[in-house]
Each structure stands twice: as C-alpha cells, then as structure tokens.
Image (spheres, coloured by chain):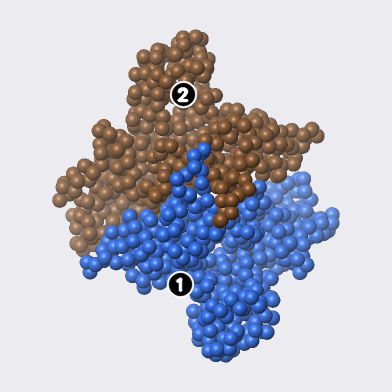
Chain colours: A blue, B brown
Amino acid sequence: MAKKNEKEFVTEITRREDDISQWYTDVILKTDLVDYAPVRGCMVIKPYGYGIWELMQKEMDSRFKATGHENVYMPMFIPESLLLKEAEHVEGFAPEVAWVTAGGSEELPERLAIRPTSETMFCAMYSKWVQSWRDLPMLYNQWCSVVRWEKSTRPFLRTSEFLWQEGHTIHATPEEAEEETIRMLNVYRDFSEKVLAIPVFVGQKSEKEKFAGARATYSMEAMMQDGKALQAGTSHNFGDNFSKAFDIQFLDKDGTRKYVSETSWGTSTRMIGGVIMVHGDDRGLVLPPKIAPVQVVILPIAQHKEGVLDACHALKQKLLAKGFRAHVDDRDTQSAGWKFNEWEMKGVPLRVEIGPRDLEKGEAMLMRRDTMEKFSLRLEGLEEEVEGILQGIHDGLYQKALAFREGHVTLASTMEELNAGVQNGLVKAMWCGDRACEDAVKQESSATTRNMPFDQEAAKAGLGEVCVHCGRPAKTVIYFAKAY
Amino acid sequence: MAKKNEKEFVTEITRREDDISQWYTDVILKTDLVDYAPVRGCMVIKPYGYGIWELMQKEMDSRFKATGHENVYMPMFIPESLLLKEAEHVEGFAPEVAWVTAGGSEELPERLAIRPTSETMFCAMYSKWVQSWRDLPMLYNQWCSVVRWEKSTRPFLRTSEFLWQEGHTIHATPEEAEEETIRMLNVYRDFSEKVLAIPVFVGQKSEKEKFAGARATYSMEAMMQDGKALQAGTSHNFGDNFSKAFDIQFLDKDGTRKYVSETSWGTSTRMIGGVIMVHGDDRGLVLPPKIAPVQVVILPIAQHKEGVLDACHALKQKLLAKGFRAHVDDRDTQSAGWKFNEWEMKGVPLRVEIGPRDLEKGEAMLMRRDTMEKFSLRLEGLEEEVEGILQGIHDGLYQKALAFREGHVTLASTMEELNAGVQNGLVKAMWCGDRACEDAVKQESSATTRNMPFDQEAAKAGLGEVCVHCGRPAKTVIYFAKAY
C-alpha cells in the first residue's frame, strides 16, 4: 500500500531533468504554497506559503531592528507628479506602473501610481521631517506589497504584485550612506546563509543593471539548480541624487545646509522561489528548518493500536515546549504511506514515526528530509536531540548548495567559453566595463551581468587581463548568467 | 526650568474641553504617531504609531491562530466582473472604489478595483478549493491594506487607505457559521478589554447598518470621550448569500451537494484612533501598557553625576531581560523637565527617575502616567514590581473608561430624551425595527443605530414597550449615538 502511494505521489511531480519549469509549477501548486489568482500575473499565497513568509519576516525584521531600523507605513498611492521628480527613476519604473484614474464614479484630477517602490514617497516625507544633523540618520523600513505590471510572470519569482520589505534611510554624509548600503547587503547575506541555507555572491551591479536612480546598486545572487541566477536582494546607495530632486536638506554642525545621502534596500517573496529552486528535489520541497512552518512531523503507525497516538501527542507537547514547530498527522482518512509521501513532498525537515513495535522498544524511527536518511532514537529524551538534527539539516543543505554552485561556476576567457558556461551555471569573466560589450554578450548568449565581486584581486585568479568580449584591457571581474 | 517646559508643552496641545477635534489632531501629530501624506485622504504611519500597530497585530494574530485560523495573502486587485457578482455587496462598495485602468502605457481590458474588502476574492478561490465536507471549515485571515475612497477623512478614524485584518471562513452548516461569527466577535471583545483597556458594547447591527451582502452583522462599539461611538470591529454572517453568487458547493457526508455558509470579520488601524480618544488627556496620549512601544521610560536626573547613567542602563537591562519594553532617555540636548513632558505626552505608562539623591537612598522615583501619581521604590528588585504596576495601570484605565461610559449612557423613552442624550453619550431606547423610524431619528438627531444587545431582557430594564420614535410596539432594545 505504501509502495503504491509512493509511486502515485512521485509521478505526480514532473522530474527536474525532464522539465524543471514544469517541476517548479508542480511543486508550488501541489504543496499548496500558492494558487493562481483570477487577476493577470497575480498569485494567492496559501497558508503553507504564507507561513514560510511569516517566518522569513520574523527573522529579517529582528535583524533590521537589531541594526537600529524602525518600521513605518507609507501610502500605496504615489501621485504622478511625485513619481516624475527624479528623471532616471521614473524612466525605469513608468513602463510597469499600474495607474489609478478613478475614485468611485469620479475621474481623479491626477493619476495615482500604485507604488512600484517607495523612494519618492519616503523622499517627500523626509523633506518635511529632517531639519538638523540631530535628526540624522533616519532608518526606516516598511513591509508591504508593491505592483510592477510584468508581461511574463511566475509565482514567487516574478509577479505583478508581490510582498516585500523596503528599507529607506537618510544620512549626514556619503560615507555613512555607503556604510549603511553595505551593512544591509551583509544583513541580507547573513539571512540567506543562516536562515535560507543559500550561499550567495555579493557584489556591485553594472551601470546598466543598477536600480533606476541609484549611484550604486549591490546585490546578492543565488544559483538555482538549473544554473540560472536569481537576484535575491539589492541594496542601493543614492548619494544625493534623490535628495537634490526632492530638496532634502539639513543644517549641519558647521552651520551650513547640506543635502542628505540616501539608501534603500529590498527583499521579497521572490526568495521563496529561490528556496524552492535551490533545495527542492524530485520528491518536492525541501525546506530549511528555520523557515519550515512544520519542522517535525510526527506520524503514528497503526494509530488505532493502544498507546500510539498518546505517545505521538506527548512527543509533540515536549517539542512545542522547546519551541519547535511540531505537528501530529493523526488523520484516519489516509494511509501511513500516503502521509509519508505528502510530508516529504511538503519538505518537512524531520519526520518521526511511532508505531506499536517502536513503543515496545522505547524507540522512534526518524527521517531527515534532506538526505532521506533513516535512523532510530530512544523516545525518552528525543526532544533534546532535535535542535542538533535540525542544525545538521541546515548545514547539510547549505553545504550541498555550495558544492552545487562550486560545480557550476566556470571561468571564461573567450566568448565560446562564456556561451558554454552560461548553459548551466554562472560564468566569471573579465569585462572592459563598456555597455556595448555587456549588450553584445546578452545578445549572443542571453546572459546578463550579475555583479562584480568586492575582492577583485581574489576574484581574478585564473582570469586574464582583457575583456571576454572585445579583448581590450579589462576593468573588472564580473559574473555573467542567465537569470530569473 | 522644568516648570517652564511643562507649561510650553501643555499649551502646545489644545485642551479637550476647548476643541476635542483639534486636541486629537494635536496629539497624533505632536506625538509622532502619523503625518499627512501628499495623497488625498491617506496617512503616513510613523514609527511610534506603527509600533503600536505591531503590538496590536501580535496580540490579535496569536488569538486568531489559537482559534484555528491561518494567514494567507490575496491579490489587492479585484476584477470589476468579480466585484459585480454579489448585488448588494457591489452596491455598498462601488461608490468608494479606487479603479486601476492602465498598466504601464496600456489601457486594461477590464478595470481592476483595489480591494475595499476581499469577500469576492476569497469566494472566487473558495469555489476552486472546496470539494467535500472533509475540506471544511476553511479558516483564513489576511493582514493587508484596503482602500475606500472617502470624502472626509481623519488619521486612523477614517482614511482612504488603512491597514487591517480580514478573516474569511467557510463552513458546512449555517449553525457553524453563526458560531464562528460570534466566536470572533468575542475574540475582538476580549482583545479590546484585555489589551486596549476599552470596554465595548457588543450586539447586532440593524438591517440598514449591516455589511453589504451580510445576513447579519455584529459589532463592538466603544464610547469616545466626546460621547460619540466608534465601531471598533465587526463580524458578519453571510449565510449562503455569497456562496450562491459564487457557486461554492461541497459534497456533504449524506452524498448531496450543498452551499457553504460563510463569515467575515475585521478590525483596523481605526482602533488606534479609539485608544487615543478613550484614554488620552490634556497632556497627550495615555497608552495601555500592552500596546505601548515603550512601557517604562527611565530618565536620568543630573546625568553627568557619577553612577546615574550606569544605574539607569543597569535597570533597563533588567527590565529587558524580563520582557518589558524599556528605554533610557539619555539625550544631553534636552533638560529633564523637557523629557518629563515629552514622555508624558507620548503616553508612556510608567516613568522611572534616577538621580544622585535617589542613588544615595538606593531608591528611584516612579510615576504612573494614567493617574500621574508619584511614588518611590527601592532600586534593588524594582524590576520585580513592574508587572504588577503595569497591570494596575491597565486595570485603572479600563475602570476609568468603564465609569466614563456608565456616566454617559442614558435611557430614552421620548425623542426629547434621545436628542438630549446623544449630545454627549450613547442612548439606549426601544425601537420598532422599521427603517423609517431609524432614518427619522438620524434626520432629527444625527444619531445612528449602533447595535442591539444580545441579552434583550436585561437590556430592557428601565425602558418601556414602545418605539422611541413612532410609539408603536417595539421589537428591540437598541443603542443610538453619533458616531465616527
């Protein structure tokens, strides 16, 4: 019976090697993370998906607060005149703005953009709020949804509306702004590694790929199992670009009026797509323990037998008391085999089976979802082992993703090498810094520049001195990849 | 110096008896709860205001989860055709809908409403998700912002965009839906009393005042200091009204297909307005301890003197370790007197002053914001007393609000009594149940019906048997009031 169900389940999800795109769609729908909404390009985030997002939020929010940031809420509407104030910014975002033109039966005197991002609104408020150096820095963040009218969408990875956080800060000096930009990039990296178990490349974006209106954009880039890159978080230094457009000045200690320096940084539900694409396997989701809505699922075997359900619930209570998210699946409408497969598909990090024979021996059978490895443990005191097992799963996932990435980064000195490399991974190459070469590489290979590593000397190892495309002297090491 | 600052501060806020509307505006702006946004009818929620909302969310969310609900996220866009599916609903909401008509430079083929509430979107999804009785109930909630294009707005109390939660549930039987509706009303009441320290009247809305598309709406109504009512939360039983319009059927145990029964319930940032209007005084905010972003503010006196700042920070650490939200105001740019007044204005429940003389005695001076009562305590072990003091403040606020309300509810047997009573409070009266009388009362007195108490027998005490307006036999006891 278990065998039959197992088969049924496994064949329900397309295998990655057959069609990774269909595999992704199968996984997100069959594990109840999301559903398609009756609105073009939008998704409904179901309880299991939203539970992951809540855990991500909690982890990030505590990091933001620990670095001195406070949450605020800005209106979702941005008057067109406000959006138009910074030229590069509006050029970048206008093509994908959703416009409100009527309230009730009245035509509005001015169109309202639904925020694609909130730099302009924060700037409008900062220009009211800041007077003197004593008011600085202002370190704000908001959790909200934003809208970008996308042509081609995929749940989590690219949708017309998505949930995110956007930090917006103003500072007295350019140096402080740069420090903040890098600080938050590192917060993101820490979060990605320690919570999502995803290794990332951090570095600076090219002029072409930077945020509309930024002086410099830094990103973290993760590698998916199909070798494509996912930009999983960005941090921008605006310098005084916006503060000049919005006239945000302060009276400095030296008695002169100066423009503030500004940053913004954001991450979104897109990271959930990254988690699926980095850790998932042919059985479905594999969730890192820190963001798993259920960390330990307890499955009773022959649950009608005396003592089985009691033992399951007793263990659950002990786990809850220690702060773990535990669940007993005591449905009597499904077989044990069905449940095994369902919870594997849902990516629960640790499974505990308890049946009559286990109880006789005072043991339970456990299974790690990441390795599918089974092992038994004494039931007495089992709850003391869970922390270590979950940390082991986290570390295992991280190391596996790191090893995969290391196996899928190639060095390219020629366009042939670059073209070959981006078929299934990231390519590290030298670049002259010219937009023309960047465009030509994209034209020839469909790969875009991802970012430029901070430690250029270390990154150069194994590379020459000339641009991979034009052969002129190179200015920088940069990663190329096809990207989501 | 302290005296002078005190005076300056107090005169900055309009006194309630002079102009309570201006007092409200002064308080919300000067305590940095909100600011006006550069968009008509919208507000910016600043860190101090958002901190209150975060604490409210946490308290409510844990109650929702404890009663079996899960969070989801639905798109903010509702296609016009979807909004039109339930006739009463669209009639109620269409006049205040903001419409998106363009994405980028393209005209949309169908207008999209920005959700004024999400019944229609939940219904569209429920009709996909429910198959059999095994899938029921579905108990979902979402935290988001909604938009209602209001003509006349006030921060928190009525804005074009506001933050809220909306619960949406479907059930197998009408009885279960009714149970859920009442359960969540009671969750709201519990939250209002135990967290906000606000007593509420709970009961059923009249046909006229019920939610557009509901079979029955229940509300909790709080009394503001100006005698007006604030509808602080509502819970709706839709019966099969929406499930018929959206064809949400399930296969029941008996093998027949049935329509689900549905509920929804919501509360919003409006409750912050209620907290201000119920507990505030001429010095500013008075925050209930459970939602105060700072519960204990520690003020060093003569902070340059040896040991003062150390003692303040040591106490703060002890308070943080016990889970309290404590803050040391060690700014050297403001006098102690200025700080006293600022934190009083911000409504921090408990103040602790520590100066050189206090240290010599091993004591600290405390002040309760609700009563402005001062008392000293041994510094050693002070942190052990805080829980009890904060609970005392909560209880004191609740009792004071309850006493105020009891002094401002009058019984009316005639329209003269009703007219007089609604000038500064709620009026309890008998009503025939006819819309004509309800409209006439509003016309004559500006008062609307608030709700009908559940225990009609008890509520009738002191009232006659005939309608306060028409004199015909009455059907129900009902509260009338001017309302926000």
Tell me the residue at 78%/67% (across/down). Answer: A18
Q: Is residue A221 visible?
A: yes
Tell me the residue at 59%/61% (across/down). Answer: A270
The residue singled out by tag 2 in the image is: B449
**A439 relative to B239, above or below:** below
**B230 relative to A208, above or below:** above
Tell me the residue at 25%/39% (across/down). Answer: B14
Q: Chain of mark 2?
A: B
**B427 relative to B3, above or below:** above
> Which x, y percent locates residue A100?
51, 48
Q: What mark, if any, has residue A216 been given in the picture?
A: 1
Q: Quadrant of residue B481?
A: top left
Residue type beneath disc 2 = Thr
Number of labels in the image equals 2
Tell me the residue at 37%/22% (across/down). Answer: B422
* Element at label 1: strand
Q: Chain of mark 1?
A: A
> Which x, y percent locates residue A5?
81, 55
